[in-house]
Amino acid sequence: MRDLIGNIIIFAGVGFAGLGILGIFRFKNFYSRVLVSSKVDTVGFITILLGVSVKHGLSFFTLKVLFIMAMALIINPLITHSIVRSAYISGYKTRKE
Amino acid sequence: MKEGDFIKRIVYYGQLVALFSLFWVVLFESLSFWVLISAPIISILSLILSEKYLLKANYYDLYYFNIFWLLKYTVVLFTEIYKSGFSIIPNILSGHANPGIVDITTEVDTNIGIALIANSITLTPGTITMDVSGQKLKVLWIDPETYNPTMAGLIIKGRLEKLF
Protein backbone atom coordinates (compact mmCIF):
# COMPACT_ATOMS: atom_id res chain seq x y z
CA MET A 1 0.00 0.00 0.00
CA ARG A 2 2.75 2.40 1.02
CA ASP A 3 4.62 1.38 -2.11
CA LEU A 4 1.64 2.30 -4.26
CA ILE A 5 1.15 5.72 -2.64
CA GLY A 6 4.87 6.44 -3.02
CA ASN A 7 4.75 5.51 -6.70
CA ILE A 8 1.72 7.75 -7.30
CA ILE A 9 3.49 10.71 -5.64
CA ILE A 10 6.65 10.08 -7.68
CA PHE A 11 4.61 10.02 -10.89
CA ALA A 12 2.91 13.28 -9.89
CA GLY A 13 6.38 14.80 -9.43
CA VAL A 14 7.47 13.57 -12.85
CA GLY A 15 4.30 15.13 -14.24
CA PHE A 16 5.14 18.49 -12.65
CA ALA A 17 8.69 18.35 -14.01
CA GLY A 18 7.35 17.45 -17.45
CA LEU A 19 4.99 20.42 -17.42
CA GLY A 20 7.91 22.68 -16.48
CA ILE A 21 10.01 21.36 -19.36
CA LEU A 22 7.05 21.84 -21.71
CA GLY A 23 6.91 25.45 -20.51
CA ILE A 24 10.63 25.96 -21.16
CA PHE A 25 10.15 24.81 -24.78
CA ARG A 26 6.92 26.72 -25.22
CA PHE A 27 8.03 30.19 -24.16
CA LYS A 28 10.49 32.14 -26.25
CA ASN A 29 11.80 34.84 -23.91
CA PHE A 30 14.34 34.52 -21.13
CA TYR A 31 12.23 35.79 -18.22
CA SER A 32 9.18 33.62 -18.93
CA ARG A 33 11.40 30.58 -19.31
CA VAL A 34 13.23 31.15 -16.05
CA LEU A 35 9.92 31.73 -14.23
CA VAL A 36 8.49 28.46 -15.48
CA SER A 37 11.69 26.50 -14.90
CA SER A 38 11.30 26.88 -11.14
CA LYS A 39 8.44 24.40 -11.51
CA VAL A 40 10.95 21.71 -12.42
CA ASP A 41 13.47 22.33 -9.69
CA THR A 42 11.14 23.08 -6.78
CA VAL A 43 7.70 21.51 -7.23
CA GLY A 44 8.86 18.53 -9.29
CA PHE A 45 11.96 17.83 -7.25
CA ILE A 46 10.20 18.16 -3.87
CA THR A 47 7.34 15.91 -4.97
CA ILE A 48 9.71 13.20 -6.25
CA LEU A 49 11.74 13.27 -3.02
CA LEU A 50 8.54 13.13 -0.92
CA GLY A 51 7.42 10.14 -2.93
CA VAL A 52 10.75 8.39 -2.37
CA SER A 53 10.58 9.02 1.38
CA VAL A 54 6.98 7.75 1.58
CA LYS A 55 7.99 4.63 -0.33
CA HIS A 56 10.84 3.79 2.05
CA GLY A 57 9.07 4.53 5.33
CA LEU A 58 10.91 5.81 8.38
CA SER A 59 14.61 4.96 8.08
CA PHE A 60 18.01 6.61 7.90
CA PHE A 61 17.68 6.66 4.13
CA THR A 62 14.49 8.76 4.40
CA LEU A 63 16.17 11.20 6.76
CA LYS A 64 19.06 11.55 4.31
CA VAL A 65 16.59 12.27 1.50
CA LEU A 66 14.89 14.89 3.68
CA PHE A 67 18.27 16.52 4.34
CA ILE A 68 18.88 16.65 0.59
CA MET A 69 15.48 18.31 0.24
CA ALA A 70 16.36 20.92 2.88
CA MET A 71 19.64 21.65 1.08
CA ALA A 72 17.80 22.02 -2.24
CA LEU A 73 15.27 24.36 -0.63
CA ILE A 74 18.10 26.57 0.62
CA ILE A 75 20.33 26.52 -2.48
CA ASN A 76 17.77 26.57 -5.35
CA PRO A 77 16.48 30.14 -4.85
CA LEU A 78 20.03 31.47 -4.52
CA ILE A 79 20.96 30.11 -7.96
CA THR A 80 17.76 31.32 -9.63
CA HIS A 81 18.13 34.72 -8.00
CA SER A 82 21.73 35.16 -9.16
CA ILE A 83 20.92 34.16 -12.76
CA VAL A 84 17.91 36.51 -13.01
CA ARG A 85 19.71 39.35 -11.25
CA SER A 86 22.66 39.19 -13.63
CA ALA A 87 20.25 39.19 -16.59
CA TYR A 88 18.45 42.22 -15.13
CA ILE A 89 21.70 44.11 -14.56
CA SER A 90 22.91 43.42 -18.10
CA GLY A 91 19.73 44.98 -19.44
CA TYR A 92 17.29 42.26 -20.53
CA LYS A 93 13.79 43.65 -21.14
CA THR A 94 10.56 41.91 -20.17
CA ARG A 95 8.43 41.01 -23.19
CA LYS A 96 4.87 39.79 -23.62
CA GLU A 97 4.23 36.40 -25.23
CA MET B 1 22.35 40.26 29.82
CA LYS B 2 18.88 39.72 31.27
CA GLU B 3 17.73 36.49 32.87
CA GLY B 4 15.15 35.64 30.17
CA ASP B 5 17.64 36.37 27.42
CA PHE B 6 20.11 33.93 28.93
CA ILE B 7 17.56 31.10 28.99
CA LYS B 8 16.54 31.88 25.40
CA ARG B 9 20.18 31.71 24.37
CA ILE B 10 20.67 28.32 26.06
CA VAL B 11 17.54 26.93 24.36
CA TYR B 12 18.70 28.26 21.00
CA TYR B 13 22.16 26.68 21.23
CA GLY B 14 20.53 23.50 22.53
CA GLN B 15 18.39 23.19 19.45
CA LEU B 16 21.39 23.89 17.20
CA VAL B 17 23.36 21.11 18.92
CA ALA B 18 20.36 18.76 18.59
CA LEU B 19 20.05 19.49 14.86
CA PHE B 20 23.78 19.02 14.22
CA SER B 21 23.80 15.79 16.25
CA LEU B 22 20.87 14.47 14.21
CA PHE B 23 22.80 15.24 11.04
CA TRP B 24 25.88 13.45 12.37
CA VAL B 25 23.92 10.35 13.41
CA VAL B 26 22.08 10.21 10.08
CA LEU B 27 25.36 10.41 8.16
CA PHE B 28 26.75 7.46 10.12
CA GLU B 29 23.48 5.48 9.78
CA SER B 30 23.92 3.83 13.16
CA LEU B 31 22.91 4.36 16.77
CA SER B 32 26.00 2.82 18.36
CA PHE B 33 27.50 4.13 21.57
CA TRP B 34 30.46 5.97 20.03
CA VAL B 35 28.38 7.74 17.42
CA LEU B 36 25.92 8.95 20.09
CA ILE B 37 28.78 10.13 22.30
CA SER B 38 30.72 11.87 19.54
CA ALA B 39 27.69 13.63 18.03
CA PRO B 40 27.21 16.39 20.65
CA ILE B 41 30.98 16.81 21.09
CA ILE B 42 31.52 17.39 17.36
CA SER B 43 28.45 19.70 17.22
CA ILE B 44 29.65 21.88 20.08
CA LEU B 45 33.18 21.94 18.65
CA SER B 46 31.98 23.00 15.20
CA LEU B 47 29.71 25.66 16.73
CA ILE B 48 32.57 27.12 18.77
CA LEU B 49 35.08 27.03 15.90
CA SER B 50 32.78 28.51 13.27
CA GLU B 51 31.62 31.23 15.66
CA LYS B 52 35.22 32.08 16.49
CA TYR B 53 36.75 32.09 13.01
CA LEU B 54 33.97 32.49 10.41
CA LEU B 55 31.32 34.81 11.85
CA LYS B 56 31.59 38.47 12.76
CA ALA B 57 29.03 38.12 15.58
CA ASN B 58 27.48 35.07 17.24
CA TYR B 59 24.82 32.76 15.87
CA TYR B 60 22.21 34.01 18.31
CA ASP B 61 22.37 37.59 17.03
CA LEU B 62 22.69 36.72 13.35
CA TYR B 63 20.54 33.64 12.75
CA TYR B 64 17.96 33.44 15.51
CA PHE B 65 15.20 30.94 14.79
CA ASN B 66 12.91 28.60 16.65
CA ILE B 67 12.65 25.03 15.40
CA PHE B 68 8.87 24.77 15.90
CA TRP B 69 8.35 28.10 14.18
CA LEU B 70 10.54 26.85 11.32
CA LEU B 71 8.39 23.72 10.97
CA LYS B 72 5.23 25.84 10.84
CA TYR B 73 6.86 28.10 8.26
CA THR B 74 7.86 25.08 6.15
CA VAL B 75 4.27 23.81 6.10
CA VAL B 76 2.95 27.21 4.97
CA LEU B 77 5.75 27.49 2.41
CA PHE B 78 4.93 24.07 0.96
CA THR B 79 1.24 24.90 0.62
CA GLU B 80 2.18 28.16 -1.11
CA ILE B 81 4.59 26.33 -3.46
CA TYR B 82 1.95 23.80 -4.47
CA LYS B 83 -0.78 26.42 -4.79
CA SER B 84 1.23 28.54 -7.20
CA GLY B 85 2.53 25.39 -8.87
CA PHE B 86 -1.04 24.56 -9.83
CA SER B 87 -1.98 28.14 -10.69
CA ILE B 88 0.84 28.38 -13.23
CA ILE B 89 -0.35 25.34 -15.25
CA PRO B 90 -2.88 27.32 -17.40
CA ASN B 91 -0.11 29.76 -18.34
CA ILE B 92 2.06 26.91 -19.58
CA LEU B 93 -0.69 25.16 -21.50
CA SER B 94 -1.97 28.31 -23.19
CA GLY B 95 1.51 29.76 -23.76
CA HIS B 96 0.43 33.09 -22.32
CA ALA B 97 2.92 35.07 -20.22
CA ASN B 98 3.33 38.77 -19.60
CA PRO B 99 6.22 39.10 -17.14
CA GLY B 100 6.47 42.34 -15.23
CA ILE B 101 8.64 43.75 -12.46
CA VAL B 102 6.82 44.79 -9.28
CA ASP B 103 8.24 46.69 -6.31
CA ILE B 104 7.03 45.54 -2.92
CA THR B 105 8.00 46.36 0.65
CA THR B 106 8.10 43.97 3.56
CA GLU B 107 7.46 44.70 7.23
CA VAL B 108 10.03 42.18 8.41
CA ASP B 109 13.05 44.06 9.74
CA THR B 110 15.70 41.45 10.62
CA ASN B 111 18.29 40.46 8.01
CA ILE B 112 17.56 36.75 8.26
CA GLY B 113 13.82 37.43 8.00
CA ILE B 114 14.23 39.46 4.81
CA ALA B 115 16.47 36.75 3.34
CA LEU B 116 13.89 34.09 4.24
CA ILE B 117 11.05 36.07 2.64
CA ALA B 118 13.07 36.79 -0.52
CA ASN B 119 14.11 33.17 -0.94
CA SER B 120 10.57 31.93 -0.29
CA ILE B 121 9.28 34.26 -3.01
CA THR B 122 11.88 32.83 -5.39
CA LEU B 123 10.93 29.27 -4.42
CA THR B 124 7.27 29.68 -5.35
CA PRO B 125 6.85 29.14 -9.11
CA GLY B 126 5.84 32.30 -10.95
CA THR B 127 7.69 34.84 -8.84
CA ILE B 128 11.42 35.57 -8.49
CA THR B 129 13.13 38.14 -6.28
CA MET B 130 15.52 40.18 -8.42
CA ASP B 131 16.89 42.72 -6.02
CA VAL B 132 16.77 43.53 -2.33
CA SER B 133 17.72 46.87 -0.81
CA GLY B 134 16.71 47.39 2.78
CA GLN B 135 13.06 46.40 3.09
CA LYS B 136 12.29 46.96 -0.61
CA LEU B 137 12.11 43.93 -2.87
CA LYS B 138 12.03 43.93 -6.67
CA VAL B 139 9.99 40.94 -7.80
CA LEU B 140 9.63 39.49 -11.29
CA TRP B 141 6.07 38.18 -11.70
CA ILE B 142 4.82 36.03 -14.55
CA ASP B 143 1.43 37.71 -14.94
CA PRO B 144 1.08 40.77 -12.68
CA GLU B 145 -2.46 41.31 -11.45
CA THR B 146 -1.54 44.72 -10.07
CA TYR B 147 1.47 47.04 -9.94
CA ASN B 148 0.40 48.63 -6.66
CA PRO B 149 3.14 47.81 -4.09
CA THR B 150 0.77 47.10 -1.19
CA MET B 151 -1.69 44.93 -3.12
CA ALA B 152 1.07 43.06 -4.94
CA GLY B 153 2.87 42.49 -1.64
CA LEU B 154 -0.30 41.04 -0.10
CA ILE B 155 -0.78 38.64 -3.00
CA ILE B 156 2.86 37.56 -3.26
CA LYS B 157 3.94 37.20 0.35
CA GLY B 158 0.83 37.84 2.46
CA ARG B 159 0.54 34.48 4.18
CA LEU B 160 4.28 34.01 4.65
CA GLU B 161 4.79 37.39 6.26
CA LYS B 162 1.97 36.88 8.73
CA LEU B 163 4.04 34.25 10.54
CA PHE B 164 6.79 36.70 11.57
Image (cartoon, coloured by chain):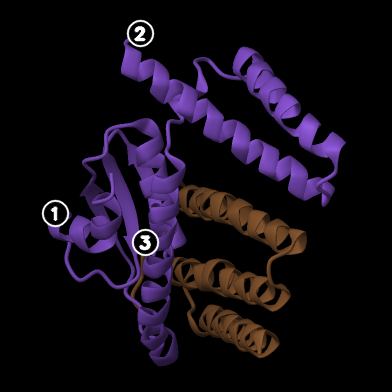
Chain colours: A brown, B purple
Please give the residue where the numbered disc 2 appears in the rendered image.
B1
Mark 3 crowd level (few <14, some 14–19, many ≥20, 10 Å Cα)? some
Which residue is at 64% across, 70% downward?
Answer: A49
> Relative to A34, is B129 on the left or the right?
left
- Nearest the viewer among A4 and B63 is A4
- Nearest the viewer among A80 and B23 is B23
Q: Nearer the observer, disc 2 or disc 3?
A: 2
**Upstream in sequence: badge 2 or badge 1:** 2
Contact (CB < 8 A) between labels 2 and 3?
no
Mark 1 crowd level (few <14, some 14–19, many ≥20, 10 Å Cα)? some
Does the rendering let one see residue B61?
no
Q: Which mark is residue B150?
A: 1
C-alpha gap between disc 2 and disc 1: 38 Å
Q: Nearer the observer, disc 3 or disc 1?
A: 3
Amino acid type shown at disc 1: Thr
Which residue is at 43% across, 91% downward?
Answer: B93
Amino acid type shown at disc 2: Met
Circles 2 and 1 on the same subunit: yes
Q: Which mark is residue B76?
A: 3
| For residue B141, above or below residue B63 | below
> Which image quarter holds the C terminus of chain B?
top left
Question: Where residue B28 sits in the image (x, y, percent)?
Answer: 83, 46
Amino acid type shown at disc 3: Val
Q: Secondary structure at mark 3?
A: helix
Q: Nearer the observer, disc 2 or disc 1?
A: 2
**Upstream in sequence: badge 2 or badge 3:** 2
| For residue B53, above or below residue B109 | above
C-alpha gap between disc 2 and disc 3: 34 Å
Res B19 → quadrant? top right
